[in-house]
């Protein structure tokens, strides 16, 4: 049996696991995959988080990708990082940089078991801030500077590829190089608030080709979290496993302990269980019905007759689901164009099950504006609602 | 003489084992359970050939190549 076949049938424990520690966030990025903003009152307590870490240690999960929300706004964040690394569970965490000052950077530089990913969705402030909010570019760059100055080696700059930043790939690489950091590019998914902006932000077909060529040219110098395997149908496979690992080699634990098949699939349909239930995370990973189904041989459905099916494996489950496409059909961004055809007949897409978005927006947050171009009814009308037709 | 790098963690799997290096943050796969046995015998004081003693002659070259790759990627260290 080839190695990749073992992964398809699932491992006794995930290779890595994403753990969103909180839905609270100081930003309000338009494409947030977890619709974060407000803290959920049912969030796992410090003790519950430590119990999860104990379990991950027993299962020999090498490391967790901690995210959110903004995980560093949890008051026990550093305590949990220390607890995990003291228990042989490595930590990679994603942050917008809000809490990475000189002191924190020095502390991070002193640990061999912590890796930091700074999120940035534009190589320039205007491109980044349009998606992540005013001031967020400066905040991220400041954090990167503190890490460099403290001697932290090989931080990651994590970029979600969009229509507005594909043209900046070289600039991103140069930015990463200037901080001694490694560039990590990931795919925009129509998950969480990403569903609302997908049509405007996902790369065009030409940009996908540009991205693929760029990835091939840069090989292992650039990390991708294996997220672009749908592009492998262009030709040679990109570095990585090139398969959907949902429920097989990866999964997500959300802030309230719910276990989902992958970080991009926060929806009841992909909910496998909760770490608070008897048997904890291990029981969910090993015995949940959903995960068992995902580990069964998958049907290529409409894609099985396509000559590129072996390369792309039908693409991303979450991208299909949240654009209303059948899971055994083409990816919405299928490079052979089958996704676009399929999308033409989709009438509605499922909505995310949860929403923790800020209700009133945040300071400096990206504000989608609709300009009213009609004239006021009367020149002296001061009431902005005058004449509004509802 | 080789041994497992102190920052490498080993997780046995049905197909062999997963190796994770906390320093380089790289993951490696051992695609044979017997290779894992060999790696475990390498403790810094065992000769490579002694560690390979149980491996059939015909397969030793393949094992040596695998061990060489592990050394190059820093999973094994002198």
Image: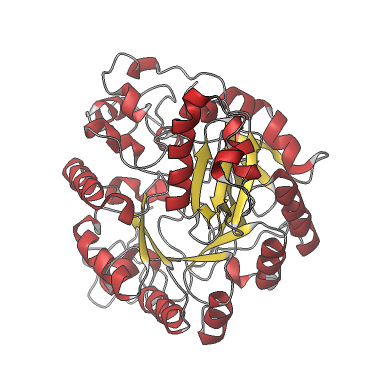
Question: Where residue A156 appears, x then y in whole percent?
Answer: 42, 64
Farthest right residue in view: A278
- Residue A253 visible in the shown view: no
Relative vertical location of residue A387 with respect to residue A293 in this rendering, above or below: below
Q: Quick check: A375 left or right of A28?
A: left
- Residue closest to the eye, B47 or A52: B47
Residue farthest along the top direction in this orientation: A305
Asked if A231 appears above or below A34 in the picture, the reply is above
- The residue positioned 64% from the left and 63% from the top of the image is A39
The x and y percentages for residue B45 are 63, 53
> Which quadrant would residue A311 be assigned to in this image?
top left
Residue A66 vs A302, above or below: the answer is below
> Taking A258 as reference, is A320 above or below it?
above
Whether residue A342 sits left or right of residue A57 in the image: it is left
Residue A6 percent coordinates (x, y): 54, 27
**Hey, which quadrant is residue A290 in on the image?**
top right
Q: Nearer the viewer, residue A206 or B7?
A: B7
Choose top left, top right, bottom left or bottom right for residue A22: bottom right
> In percent of the image, x 73 and y 39: which residue is there?
A282
Colour mapping = secondary structure
- Closer to the camera, B20 or A101? B20
- Tally the marks: 0
Residue A100 % position (x, y):
51, 78
Please tell me which residue lies in front, A113 or A185: A113
Residue A233 visible in the picture:
yes
Residue drawn 80% across the image and 61% down it: A47
């Amino acid at each position: 049996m080839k190695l990749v076949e073992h992964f398809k049938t699932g491992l006794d424990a995930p290779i890595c696991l994403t753990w969103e520690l909180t839905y609270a966030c100081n930003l309000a990025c338009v494409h947030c995959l977890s619709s974060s903003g407000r803290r959920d009152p049912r969030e796992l307590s410090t003790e519950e988080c430590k119990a999860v870490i104990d379990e991950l240690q027993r299962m020999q999960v090498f490391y967790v990708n901690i995210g959110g929300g903004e995980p560093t706004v949890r008051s026990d964040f550093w305590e949990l990082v220390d607890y995990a690394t003291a228990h042989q569970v490595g930590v990679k965490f994603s942050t917008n940089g809000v809490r990475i000052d000189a002191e924190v950077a020095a502390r991070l530089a002193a640990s061999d078991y912590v890796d930091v990913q700074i999120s940035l969705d534009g190589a320039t402030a205007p491109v980044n801030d349009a998606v992540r909010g005013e001031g967020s570019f400066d905040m991220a760059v400041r954090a990167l500077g503190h890490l460099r100055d403290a001697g932290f080696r090989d931080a990651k700059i994590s970029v979600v590829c969009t229509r507005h930043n594909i043209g900046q790939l070289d600039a991103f690489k140069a930015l990463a190089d200037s901080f001694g950091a490694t560039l990590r590019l990931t795919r925009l998914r129509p998950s969480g608030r990403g569903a609302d902006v997908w049509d405007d932000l996902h790369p065009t077909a030409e940009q996908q080709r540009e991205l693929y060529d760029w990835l091939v040219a840069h090989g292992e110098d650039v990390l991708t979290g294996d997220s672009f395997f749908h592009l492998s149908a262009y030709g040679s496979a990109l570095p990585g496993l090139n398969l959907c690992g949902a429920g097989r080699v990866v999964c997500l634990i959300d802030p309230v302990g719910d276990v989902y098949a992958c970080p991009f699939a926060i929806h009841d349909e992909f909910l496998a269980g909760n770490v608070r239930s008897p048997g904890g995370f291990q029981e969910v990973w090993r015995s949940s019905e959903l995960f068992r189904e995902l580990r069964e041989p998958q049907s290529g459905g409409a894609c099985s007759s396509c000559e590129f099916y072996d390369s792309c494996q039908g693409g991303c489950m979450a991208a299909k689901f949240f654009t209303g496409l059948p899971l055994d059909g083409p990816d919405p961004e299928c490079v052979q164009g089958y996704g676009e055809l399929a999308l033409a007949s989709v009438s509605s897409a499922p909505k995310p099950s949860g929403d923790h978005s800020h209700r009133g927006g945040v300071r400096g947050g990206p504000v989608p504006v609709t300009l009213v171009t009609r004239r006021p009814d009367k020149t002296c009308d001061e009431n902005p609602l005058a004449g509004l037709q509802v | 003489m080789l041994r497992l790098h102190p920052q490498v963690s080993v997780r046995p799997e049905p197909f062999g084992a997963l190796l994770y290096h906390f320093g380089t943050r790289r993951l490696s796969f051992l695609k044979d359970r017997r290779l894992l046995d060999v790696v475990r015998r390498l403790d810094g004081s065992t000769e490579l050939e002694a560690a390979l003693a149980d491996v059939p002659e015909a397969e030793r070259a393949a094992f040596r190549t695998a061990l060489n790759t592990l050394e190059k990627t820093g999973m094994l260290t002198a």
